Amino acid sequence: MCENGIYEAHGLYKWYGRKAALNGATFSVQPGKLVGLLGPNGSGKTTLLKISAGLLTPSGGSVLIDGQEPGVYTKSVTSYLPDRMALPTEMRAADAVSLYADFYTDFDAGKAHEMLNDLHIEAQDRIGAMSKGTQEKMQLCLTMSRAARLYLLDEPLGGVDPAARDYILQTILRNYSENAALVLSTHLIGDIEKALDEVIFLKDGAVLRQVGVDALREESGQSVDEYFREVYRC
């Protein structure tokens, strides 16, 4: 078990040709924290999460999850929600639950079925026939039905209608333990900031600032959303 953060980046770089998607990003996230990964489009959020999930290889620096670089072990303790549908569209919801149950020993199929039912997603609903928002809700239910040590959520509210956002937020809050950390990227800061412990601001692939939400509000006299708009104003 890592004595420092459960999730760390040290001088992390990712180059695409001459363009740096990540430019020396460095941070540490402690267990029990719900952290917002914030920044404008192109700031490196999705690239960071994909490297952390083992889907991309960094050009330099490192990511450590529970003290180890992304690999077989880290995938066993990390539950990752991608920014787009990652399951075959011919699958039904029940097939997706069965797939996760086969792949992950920490997956709770009963919890997944309960959450899907709450969101009116039927077991026999085919993924390809679902709306984008319904697909995203289904993937989130699967992701949060694991008893992971680290949850990485890439835009979990992106395609979700406002009426379902409160349920989604409660789903996120109820289903990760104090021994786990949860990091999510979002543009819908006003909807999520009440649940956040900390925020990491990314700009041009580097960490502009990591700060506690309460400390930021006290120091700036602004909400996280207001502070974000000021810092990244065009």
Image (tube, rainbow, N blue to C red):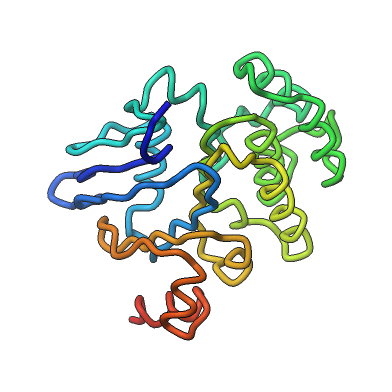
Residue displayed at 74% across by 53% down: 170
On the image, which quarter does residue 147 sit in? top right
Residue 116 location (% of width, % of height) = 80, 39
Residue 132 location (% of width, % of height) = 66, 49
> Left of 207 or right of it: where is 137?
right
Q: Quadrant of the C terminus?
A: bottom left
Residue 139 location (% of width, % of height) = 65, 38
Residue displayed at 70% across by 46% down: 137
Direction top: furthest residue: 102
Residue displayed at 70% across by 25% down: 96
> Left of 21 or right of it: where is 77?
right
Direction bottom: furthest residue: 221
Q: Quadrant of the N terminus?
A: top left
Direction left: furthest residue: 18
Q: Which is nearer the eye, 29 or 193?
A: 29
On the image, which quarter does residue 91 sit in? top right
User: Quick check: 107 above or below 5?
Assistant: above
Q: Which is nearer the eye, 112 or 5?
A: 5
Residue 117 location (% of width, % of height) = 87, 39
User: Quick check: 214 above or below 159?
Assistant: below
Q: How many marks?
A: 0
> Left of 15 or right of it: where is 183?
right
